[in-house]
Image (cartoon, rainbow, N blue to C red):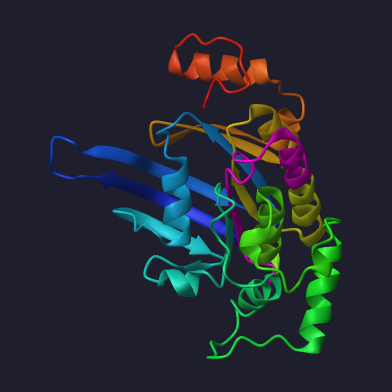
Amino acid sequence: MTPMLKLSMIHKSFNQGTVDERVALNNIQLQLAEGDFVTVIGSNGAGKSTLMNIISGVLQPDEGTIEIDGRVTNRMPEYDRGRLIGRVFQDPMAGTSPAMTIEENMAIAYGRDKQRTVRIGVNRKRREMFKETLETLHLGLENRLSAKVGLLSGGERQALSLVMATFTKPKVLLLDEHTAALDPSREQIITKLTKEIVERDKLTTLMITHNMQQALDLGNRLIMMDSGTIILDVPQEKKQNLTIQGLINEFSRIRGANFVSDRTVLA
């Protein structure tokens, strides 16, 4: 069976040929089957965000190939790749237009995988569809379609970003620490919504998180990155019995380092 996402021999360096040269990704090999929900942990500088940017097309790899649903996407422009990929960022202000209304933002998201047109259409049929979609969030946003997105709270905006990123059921969903900037109560709401949406629509998902408990609780697989490489890949049958301390022990064993027991030890 063709993987939904396949990364082969991915290498990426910055400031090549200078004293500041840094290897961000080194020989990354990664495959996600359709419906896989993979959480990604690792310290700052491990290469997690670079990995997301390579997949989405923000950055180009120095070497290697990216395949989405069997299509090599290396030379595909970022806007074209956006028809295959949904992405939610850490910053609730990213991914939406604050000066536009909720329904206008949703109309843009709805048209992402369709032929481009000059006019953003919000007719009665689409408005009802937007309302029905927002009702699943249980945040009351379905009654505020004409509200400017800039007036929403961080949690509300992140929930809207999540809906917009998954509206057209993308081939791959990228979640880049999308709960990290929220307070604990909002974080719980967005985490719950993420689980519900990904499982309901069987979305192939790659999620970066610094919260190790969240990484253990969500998804069917966990990978750990360090210094631009994947140092641990935990399948579902092992992941469900793994603890935070077990993750720390694995990191210490692989890297030969000693760390205290803390939920953000890999942050």
Residue drawn at 83 percent across, 56 percent down: 139
Compared to residue 64, the image places residue 256 above or below, namely above
Residue drawn at 71 percent across, 23 percent down: 242
Q: Nearer the viewer, residue 168 or 246?
A: 168
Q: For this view, does 109 lie left or right of residue 9?
A: right
Q: Position of residue 165 (x, y in %)?
A: 64, 63
Compared to residue 3, the image places residue 30 above or below, namely above
Range drawn in magenta: 168-191
Q: For this view, does 120 lie left or right of residue 258?
A: right
Residue drawn at 68 percent across, 57 percent down: 152
Q: Position of residue 181 (x, y in %)?
A: 59, 40
Residue 1 visible to an observer of this rendering: no
Q: Position of residue 120 (x, y in %)?
A: 61, 86
Q: Position of residue 63 (x, y in %)?
A: 31, 53
The number of numbered badges drawn on the structure is 0
Compared to residue 58, the image places residue 110 above or below, namely below
Q: Is 73 contained in the magenta span?
A: no
